[in-house]
Image (cartoon, rainbow, N blue to C red):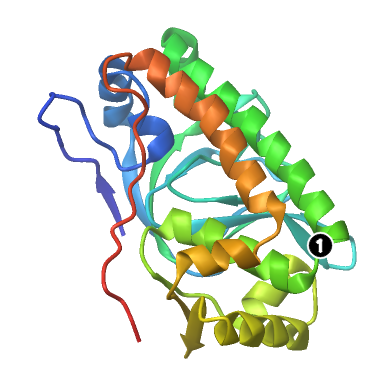
């Protein structure tokens, strides 16, 4: 389902779009973007980009979550990025390259704002704030890819599962995360039994529970304690760059954050 973005103004008169990266832009930039955006509903396993294939659209997720993976010739792969309401994809579009080298697939269904790639690049050229924000986000994703590569090599699976669930929790902005053990295993590049054991350990600590393809976050502090250092590292890097850019656009109000709804989706 596609629909045009409707007018939505906050009390301050800003156009609110629902994506943290876009909502950190100054009002004039968001107003310029809005006519070019449409809302799409994206289902699980919907492929948004394939390595070596030209893309015609860029996506700014609202409540869906997209996995960015490096894929080998035999079809195996591993995640090097996770994108939700915090960002956009493919990042290569912002850098002038319409042919990404990663596979980008929807892991958690939801909606995204979609814009023609050429229109986005034109807006970057005519509105410096858009270009500055997207280039900073590209740097964020380069760092995230490097951090997750190290994470895959150095950290225990239970720590990596906790880190992934925290990143997903931030991006869906609710306590229920619709992901199966099989999907999580594929994303992390491991076997499913290993994910099941890790999930059982996290459940025993009281941080999560799960059933029927859904993980419920029960105690975020315990989940953070179980995660490796990579969650805090990628979160801090995002805040340092993106929130600092947003603060420069909104010196009086500081950065604009994508708040979690914390709706009671408990089991």
Q: Residue furthest left?
A: 11
Out of 97 and 22, give the one closest to the viewer: 22
Q: Which quadrant of the rendered structure holds the C terminus?
A: bottom left
Q: Which residue is mark 1?
A: 155
Q: Is label 1 in a helix, a strand or a loop?
A: loop
Residue that appears at 50% across and 78% down: 208
Q: Is residue 195 above or below residue 88?
A: below
Query: At which x and y percent is residue 144?
Result: 69, 42
Query: At which x and y percent is residue 103?
Result: 69, 54
Asked whether residue 213 is in view, the answer is no
Q: Is residue 219 above or below residue 92?
A: below
Residue 212 in the figure: left or right of residue 161: left
Residue that appears at 50% across and 70% down: 44
Q: Is residue 1 above or below residue 211?
A: above
Query: At which x and y percent is residue 13?
Result: 13, 24
What is the quadrant of residue 9 in the picture? top left
Asked whether residue 191 is in view, the answer is yes
Out of 53 and 34, give the one closest to the viewer: 34
Residue 214 in the figure: left or right of residue 11: right
What is the quadrant of residue 110 in the picture? bottom left
Q: Which quadrant of the rendered structure holds the N terminus?
A: bottom left
Residue that appears at 65% across and 38% down: 141
Residue 134 in the figure: left or right of residue 155: left
Query: At which x and y percent is residue 142?
Result: 71, 35
């Amino acid at each position: 389902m596609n629909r045009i973005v409707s007018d939505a103004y906050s009390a301050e008169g800003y156009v609110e779009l629902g994506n943290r990266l876009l909502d950190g832009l100054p009002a004039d930039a968001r107003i310029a973007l809005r006519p070019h955006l449409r809302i799409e509903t994206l289902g699980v396993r919907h492929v948004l980009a394939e390595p070596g294939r030209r893309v015609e659209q860029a996506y700014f997720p609202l409540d869906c979550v997209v996995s960015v993976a490096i894929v080998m010739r035999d079809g195996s792969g591993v995640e090097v990025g996770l994108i939700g309401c915090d960002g956009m994809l493919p990042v290569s579009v912002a850098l002038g390259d319409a042919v990404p080298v990663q596979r980008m697939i929807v892991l958690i269904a939801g909606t995204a704002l979609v814009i023609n790639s050429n229109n986005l690049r034109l807006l970057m050229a005519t509105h410096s704030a858009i270009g500055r924000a997207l280039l900073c986000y590209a740097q964020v994703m380069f760092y995230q890819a490097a951090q997750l590569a190290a994470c895959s090599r150095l950290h225990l699976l239970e720590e990596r599962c906790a880190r992934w669930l925290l990143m997903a929790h931030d991006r869906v902005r609710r306590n229920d995360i619709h992901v199966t053990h099989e999907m999580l295993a594929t994303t992390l590049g491991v076997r499913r039994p290993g994910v099941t054991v890790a999930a059982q350990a996290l459940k025993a600590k009281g941080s999560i529970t799960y059933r029927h393809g859904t993980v419920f976050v029960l105690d975020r502090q315990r989940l953070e304690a179980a995660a490796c250092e990579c969650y805090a590292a990628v979160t801090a890097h995002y805040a340092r760059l993106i929130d600092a850019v947003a603060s420069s656009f909104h010196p009086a109000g500081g950065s604009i954050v994508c708040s979690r709804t914390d709706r009671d989706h408990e089991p």
